[in-house]
Amino acid sequence: MNTLELGILFPAFLAGLLVLATHIPFGMRVLQRGVIFADIAVAQIAGLGVIIAELLDLGAQPLLVQLVAATSALCGAALLAWIERGAPEVKEACIGLTFVLAASLGILLMSRDVHAGEHLKDLLVGQILWVSNTQLIATALLTGALLAIWKGLRQRLGNFGFYALFALAVTASVQLVGIYLVFASLIVPALATHRHPQRRYLYAFAVGIAGYVLGLLLSVRFDLPAGAAIVWALMLCGTAAALLKYSPP
């Protein structure tokens, strides 16, 4: 591996660690609450905020883009909290429908953009290999704040409190790694270790870190889209971890 490749891979790996730091505990709570579609719905709504910010020509003002995206995601969090409280028996159907509507609206908004295809690809699979130092620093600060709140208040968070923290975490990660990788980072480590009551966090982070490392290496070695490669690498590592749980002594 040459210096140039290492210079690209290391920031991408740091971005992956930041995503996993919040998405693993949130993913475990999502599985516990039985709202699996919530993560991808909030991610899509946050992405919709980014699209709206671009249509408003705010792309050159990152803080305003973040504000629009975060506001959009918080509105989505409020909607999901209302759905979970008001229609618990059909919450998964309603949340899944919310995702489809947000995704469809994004496509409609981009329909007259000649670069829509490229923008949509970036939104879905991300540009993890090209994260900037500014993005990493801003995400690290937000991650630290969210983890501090989560550690201190998670037992007292209501529906909206949980979804609000979740929405802010997803808002940042969507712009780092894309919607597909956000979903995989939330669900795969948590799902792969749901039968590991002891040291679950350790095993989940091992799955997540291994998946990001393997995916990044495969993307460079075979010139593959990094986001999609990491999604599959996470799935392979998660499957291996789940199978090891059932392997004979």
Image (cartoon, rainbow, N blue to C red):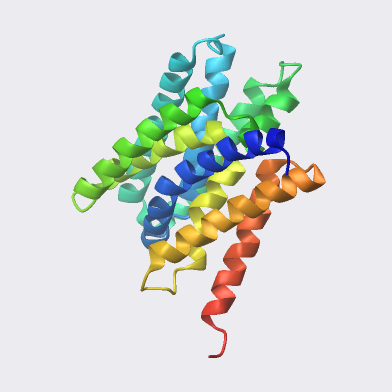
Residue 123 shows up from this direction? yes
Q: Which residue is depicted at the point 46% across and 32% down? A: 172
Q: Quadrant of residue 165?
A: top left
152 is higher (above) or lower (below) than 121 = below
Q: Position of residue 2 (x, y in %)?
A: 73, 39
Residue 190 shows up from this direction? no
Q: Which residue is depicted at the point 40% across and 67% down? A: 200
- The answer to whether 117 appears left or right of 38 in the picture is right
Query: How many badges with numbers are in the image?
Result: 0
Q: Quadrant of the N terminus?
A: top right
The residue closer to the viewer here, 205 or 68, is 205
The residue closer to the viewer here, 32 or 194, is 194
81 is higher (above) or lower (below) than 52 = below
Q: Position of residue 151 (x, y in %)?
A: 25, 49
Q: Position of residue 98 (x, y in %)?
A: 50, 40
The residue closer to the viewer here, 96 or 117, is 117
